[in-house]
Image (cartoon, rainbow, N blue to C red):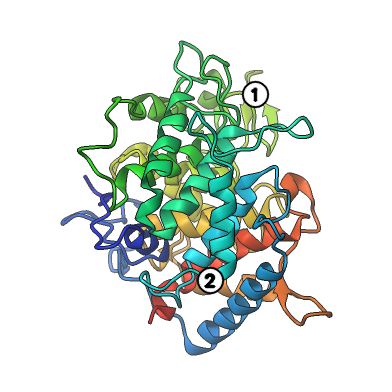
Amino acid sequence: MAVDLRLRASSACVGVLILFSGIAANASAGTSAGSDDRQSADAEVLVSSPVSLDPSTLKDGLHSLDLGLRWLSIQQHPDGSWSLAQYPALTGLAVACYCLDPRRAPADPLPEAAQKGVAFLLGCVRPDGGIYVSSDQAPALPHYNTALASMALVLTGDESHRAVIENARRFLVGGQHLGSDVFSGGFGYEADPNRKYADLSSTYMVLESVWAAENSAFRDEKQDFQDERRLDWAAALEFLTRVQNLPGSNDQPWAQSATKDDRGGFVYHPGESKAGDEMSEDGSRRFHSYGSMSYAGLLSLLYADVDRDDPRVVAAVDWIRRHYTVDENPGMGAQGLYYSFHTMAKALIHWGEEPLVLPSGRRAFWRKDLARKLVSLQRIDPQTSLGYWVNDNGRWWESDPVLATTFALMALDMVLGPSARP
């Protein structure tokens, strides 16, 4: 196993915190991230040894983080929720921002806003173990809401939430679609395992939540998983393979004509890419890869414990090298920009290579690049002098400043972590 996925922490959340802030051990002896044959022989690849940010970037990043967390606090509703209360996932994202704050030691109590948010999430727990709101005004989206809410509870490190987290894990696992169709192994936003549908965004969120629950330091192996309801990781990997633009691994016809530019990246689901499609020379349809799903795809492969030298992982990282940028969501422009930033931070931290060596030979110090980009995009509220983020392109709710701000803050939390940790 090339990536150490076990959380060997003395407190319940510190392992997940360490992973997302880039300090976790990432490579086994003799394993290197340099499987890209274009990487120069003398290039130094830093695996599990993050490069410290320069003082100016760190200072600006921490100031931006402080303004953002304070802004987020005053957006909280009296009931403890953020943004739309019918979607507990949004509150889960906000709570995660405080849990991941690199200035906070794992033993420190959560800020009051985060504690109120946790109380709201616990109030959304359903008898079936899911964490969602049943409403006539909005779809429940049980997988989406449960995955993000449960992840936030894991990050709190509060052992009293163990039963809620375990029940949420069972609920999520029970919604895995297993069948003979192309969606088998994946997850959709809904919790119906018989529905022939799954997408990579939902699947990545569920895999991350389940992985965190199964590896949390306070999991009791003697008491948890008694019903043997476990995620079928092999089936999940089959689904992930079917959304990667990789001939030879992906058995779908559309993947066989993947262009060099698309090769290795990921699409939304086996029959759609949000980045569009085109007809190939032989008349077959092919889908374009794009950034946010490619980062989510790489993360999902690593959560599934796929070796670093597996062709699917190598191809995914190669696509990321070729399309490296912090100026856009590659292939999508401004659409889903902040979602892309936060998946980028997690994926590159989990991959563990810093700097990232690009095909040109340039060494991309992605923590610094991403920190500076986020600082530059922060807007200042003239009434409070606090900071927030919002996407002028409103696709996927990013015109909601609370949602965009949570994605930005989580990315900042993670890229600043190694340099800011007390």
Query: Which amino acid, by three-letter code, is at mark 1?
Result: Glu
Query: Which amino acid, by three-letter code, is at mark 2?
Result: Pro
Left or right side of 407 for 335: right
Q: Which residue is mark 2?
A: 111
Q: Is residue 205 above or below residue 330?
A: above
Q: Earlier in the sequence, mark 1 or mark 2?
A: 2
Q: In the rendering, at what x and y percent does residue 38 appear? A: 38, 55
Left or right side of 21 for 147: right
| Residue 231 position by quadrant | top left
Residue closest to the far bottom: 55
Q: Nearer the viewer, residue 179 or 222?
A: 222
Q: Which residue is mark 1?
A: 281
Q: Which element type, helix, strand or loop, lies under badge 1? A: loop
Q: In the rendering, at what x and y percent does residue 75 appear? A: 72, 65
Q: Which element type, helix, strand or loop, lies under badge 2? A: loop
Q: Which residue is at a point 50% across and 60% down the rendered structure image?
A: 345
